[in-house]
Image (cartoon, rainbow, N blue to C red):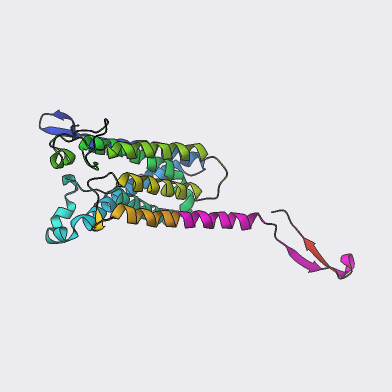
Amino acid sequence: MNPILFKIGPVEIRWYGTMIALAYLVGLWLARREARRKGLDPLLMEEFSYIVLPAALIGARLYYVLFSDAWYFLQHPLKILAFWEGGLAIHGAILGGAASALWFTHRKGIPFLRWADTLAPSVVLGQAIGRIGCFMNGDAFGVPTQMPWGVVFSPDSPAGAQFPSIPLHPTQLYELTLDVIIFLILWKIRKQPAPRGFLFFLYALLYSIARAGVEFFRADSLYITEGLRTAHVVGLIIIAVSLLGMFILHHHRTNSAKPRISSYTNPSRCNGKRTIVNPKP
């Protein structure tokens, strides 16, 4: 696999940047469509896209810096800005995007969970497209394998440099496939009656489970300590938060559906006896 899509003289157009741009455009188009369906102003989604892209890139870079070799970056602080040399993490991008969404929705007076539900299918589809860039770039790569679908990466890619001429698990394609499946699930059920926030929590839950599974095959994982992968720890936290959020939504919906009971005494109509009134929910 070659990370360079094509060259125009001295200018190189790379797969990774091209796929990130494509993911951004497709995600924005889909999010505008969903915003319109949900009664939100599509222009707000476009305005948000100018904020979330840099926020996601900053989050992705800081996450990588923190969990890869923080001491090295403290000694070479200018290297923190050199993201073009490699080093972006999807969990950091998600956290950065979520933080920007919280700020934006608060500023615009939009319920965060309504906004998050609108964005969820776009986000996971964008992640799937981005993994094509990772595959062609030779990063986010897997461990060596004897399976017939093992991939030998270009020597000038991160995977090829670490494992020259050795077939590797195409973990980028594993995650791409799982992301597409998650997108199809979300797209199928997005119109079904559900409490606000359910689609967002379902996305976070399913993606965290999928990523945790793929992580076992990754050769370039980030580690909190030896033997403890960062993606597994962060994934477990997101899974726990998602399950808690879904439980709260279900509990709130169940309580809201119960008829409210009020009592009053009306001597002229019920001879002083207490009457139970069950108004419509």
Q: Please state the horizontal and vertical placement of residue 35, each as a whole percent of the image.
A: 47, 42
Q: Is-magenta flag for residue 202?
A: no
Of residue 118 and residue 51, the one placed in the foreground of this image is: 118
Left of 81 or right of it: where is 277?
A: right
Q: Which residue is the extreme one toward the left? A: 10
Q: What quarter of the picture does the C terminus occupy?
A: bottom right
Magenta residue span: 243-270
Q: Is-magenta flag for residue 261?
A: yes
Number of on-image labels: 0
Q: Please state the horizontal and vertical placement of residue 147, each as a whole percent of the image.
A: 27, 33
Left of 250 or right of it: where is 105?
A: left
Q: What quarter of the picture does the N terminus occupy?
A: top left
The quarter of the displayed image where residue 125 is located:
top left
Q: Which residue is the extreme one toward the front? A: 146
Q: Please state the horizontal and vertical placement of residue 265, each as a whole percent of the image.
A: 82, 69
Give the residue at x 17% y 41%: 158
Majority secondary structure of magenta residues? helix
Q: Residue 40, relative to residue 233: is it above or below? A: above
Residue 41 visible? The answer is yes
Q: Please state the horizontal and vertical placement of residue 95, each as a whole percent of the image.
A: 34, 53
Q: Residue 99, relative to residue 131: is it above or below? A: below
Residue 110 visible? The answer is no
